Image (cartoon, helix red, strand yellow):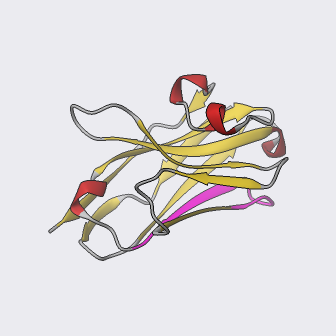
Amino acid sequence: VQLQASGGGLVQAGGSLRLTCAFSGDTFSRYAMAWFRQAPGKEREFVAGVNWNSGFTYYGDFVKGRFTISSDNAKNLVYLQMNSLKPEDTAKYYCAAIRGSPNLEVVTTHIRYDYWGQGTQVTVSS
């Protein structure tokens, strides 16, 4: 499995970005997908995840309705739409994949994931 993240950049506070993760190498629907982020000196943090089998989506507590995870299953793409961005959202964002139908505890735990993209940098200026 290969994951390729893109769409990061520099944006002013209050702005929006859409990140894209391209999945290849296996059957997309067999995997749950998630976005994590990591700022310098900080732990990797769960942002959003989706379990296609259950239809559930999950979000980190800090998201508070600002971000939305979605997909284009025909194109094997996962998106993270980020609105109302804040300077504290500045981090490198990674997409990740785990095979199966994981529960909430697994979806939100980065060490459980099998595959990672290379990350895309998001910088929010104040």
In the rendered view, tell whether residue 43 sits above or below residue 9. Answer: above
The magenta stretch is: 71-83
Percent position of residue 47, x then y:
48, 49
Residue 49 at what x, y percent from top left? 61, 48
Inspect the magenta stretch and tell me whether residue 73 lies in it.
yes
Give the percent coordinates (x, y) of residue 101. 80, 36
Q: Residue at x 83, y 45 (%)?
A: 29
Would residue 44 appear left or right of 76 to someone viewing this image? left
Residue nearest the viewer, comparing 19 with 107: 107
Question: Could you tell me which quadrant the N terminus lies in?
Answer: top right
Q: Is the magenta stretch mostly helix, strand or loop?
A: strand
Q: Is residue 101 left or right of residue 77?
A: right
**In this orientation, which residue lies closer to the viewer: 82 or 5?**
82
Q: Position of residue 54 (x, y in %)?
A: 83, 49
In the rendered image of this protein, does residue 87 appear above or below residue 2?
Answer: below
**Residue placed at 66% from the left, 44% from the top?**
33
Q: Quadrant of residue 28?
A: top right
